[in-house]
Every structure is written in structure tokens, then in C-alpha cells.
Image (tube, helix red, strand yellow):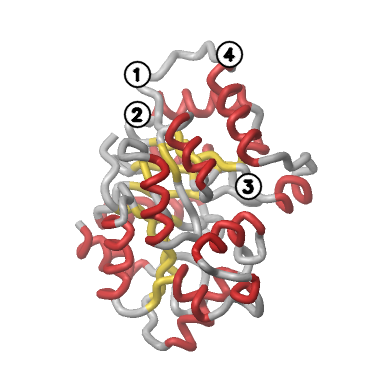
Amino acid sequence: MELGKIGVWTWLDHLSAEETAAFAQRVESWGYSALWIPEAVGRDPFSLIGYLAARTERLILATGIANIYARDPMATKAIWKTLSEIAPGRFILGLGVSHHHLVSGQRGHEYKKPLSTMRTYLEAVDQALYLGKPPEEDAPIVLGALRDKMLALSASAAQGAHPYLTTPEHTRRARGVMGSEALLCPEQMVIAETDPAKAREIARGALKMYIRLPNYQNNLKQFDFTDADFEDGGSDRLVDAIVCWGDADKIEGQVRAHLDAGADHVCIQSFRTDGAPGSDEALLEELARRLA
């Protein structure tokens, strides 16, 4: 697999299937190497990846991140092997423990200790029965990891990590924990807006479903953020650390800061300045030219 320096991370559930394929084709034409697709309460990401793989030529398609509580280990192994075969060199299996409210509240499962649950799950995937035609090469597995122990597991039991809602400082720390060989693919939120008030308003809208969650709060507290930073939609300091807003030069610099800190690949999530759902495609196209 030739995973380039930059990819696109985005929600696609507001688009029709045909619109989603057209967007993926544009992402590929701009020069991005990967498209990262989340899982929450919308489409099945693996069905969508199979659909998009047939409608693109080179684009790597990754889950960012699939919920391990949504499928038992045998189902996940079948998906992993199947997509590794039908999209060779173009699939990354991203797995994560999700969040308590999505696992217990929405799915009705018991939310267990994240680290031991993930370790046990990966072992079960490895041992699960699969009698289909094996792929020539298994797709890499990356974990939705934030804190040190899960980052270490990402390097020892998988091929890398896909941290979300982080900073270049976290990327530097993650590289130190994981060593030099494991894939490190952090996500970065960006907004092409130079007015501080407007940019922060857009950013707070994007962050509101995340910054109340313990997983993200506990990680960010390692970097000198406190409970006060998570109140009232997030402090300016917190918002500015997580969401890079400004002109293209500033945003390019933030992506390069992750790469300089040890990232192999940065997953760029761009927000539209008019508040509509979807990516700022003009910004993505500009960043692709700058970071090629």
C-alpha cells in the first residue's frame, strides 16, 4: 500500500450514493491518497467502501473509525478479508471502542474497559474462522487510539493508530509511544475562515458532540486543558488548538506540523464556512496542490 501524506476525512451520510461516488472521484482527482469514512448511526461503512472501490481507481478507503461493538469478531474478520481481496492495497480497517452513549444507549451493549476489550477483540478476530478465498495481502488495521496504552496496543497488536480530535503535540507524543514503524494517521479539522468570531462559531458547532465525551476530555487533559476548557462550547484556547482556522498558509502549516511531529498521513476534515454539511471542496483542492 502506498499511503500518501494526506487524506480526506468526512461524513457522507447527507449525500446520495451517486453523489458520494462523485465526491470520492473528485478527492482522487485532486491527488489525495485516502478517504476516511466514519461510522456512527448512518450508513454501513463497509458496504459503502465496496461501492466506492468499484467507482474509483487508486483511492485508499478507510474506516475512521468502525465500532467494534457493531460486529462480532467473526463478522469483522470476514469483512477484513473480503475487502482486502476485492480492493487490494486500497483498504484500511480502522477499529475503535466508540463511546458509552453510542454503545450502551444506542446499541444496548455493555460498554467495557476500552483497552482490555480491544485487546480481546483483536485476538478473537485473529482466531476467528474464515473459509473464503484469502487475499494476497491483508489490509492494515489501525486503532482509534488516544492515550498511551491504546497507542502502544496499536503498534503491537495492529499496524498503527488513527487519533481523532488531537493536536500536533499529541502526534509527537504518539510517535514516541508507538515507535518508528507503526502507521500514525491523525485527523485534523480545518476551516478557511479568517474572522475569529465566525471561525470559532463554526468550530464550536463541529465540536459540540465531541468535547463532552470522557474519552476526548481525558486525552486533552494530558495537554494542560482543564474542566473549564470544556464548558460553554469550549474555550477559545481549546477550540483554536483542535480546529485550525485561517488562510490556506496557516492551515497548510498545521498539516505540516503533524507531519513534522511524526505523522505518516494526516486526515483532513474541512468544514464549510456557510455552515452547510459536507466538505469545503475548494479548500481541499487548494491543500492538495500545496501538500502534493
| Callout in the foreground (3, 2) | 3
Q: Position of residue 62 (x, y in %)?
A: 43, 42
The residue type indicated by label 3 comes to Ser
In this rendering, the answer to whether 159 lies above or below 166 is: above
Instruction: Report the residue at 75% width, 49% height from top.
Output: 106
The residue type indicated by label 2 comes to Pro
Residue on which the image places disc 2: 88
User: Tag on residue 98?
Assistant: 3
| Label located before the other in sequence (3 or 4) | 3
| Label located before the other in sequence (2 or 4) | 2
Can residue 50 be seen in this snapshot?
no
The residue type indicated by label 4 comes to Leu
Secondary-structure class at tag 3: loop
The residue type indicated by label 1 comes to Glu
Between the residue at mark 1 and the residue at mark 2, the CA separation in whole angstroms equals 8 Å
| Label located before the other in sequence (1 or 2) | 2
Secondary-structure class at tag 4: loop
User: Tag on residue 129?
Assistant: 4
Quarter of the rendering containing residue 194: bottom left
Name the image quarter holding the C terminus: bottom left
Between the residue at mark 1 and the residue at mark 4, the CA separation in whole angstroms equals 18 Å
Between the residue at mark 2 and the residue at mark 4, the CA separation in whole angstroms equals 21 Å
Contact between marks 1 and 3 (CB within 8 A): the answer is no
Q: Position of residue 193 (x, y in %)?
A: 39, 81
Contact between marks 2 and 4 (CB within 8 A): the answer is no
Q: Position of residue 134 (x, y in %)?
A: 43, 15
**Quick one: label 4, few (<14), some, or many (20+) residues within 10 Å?**
few
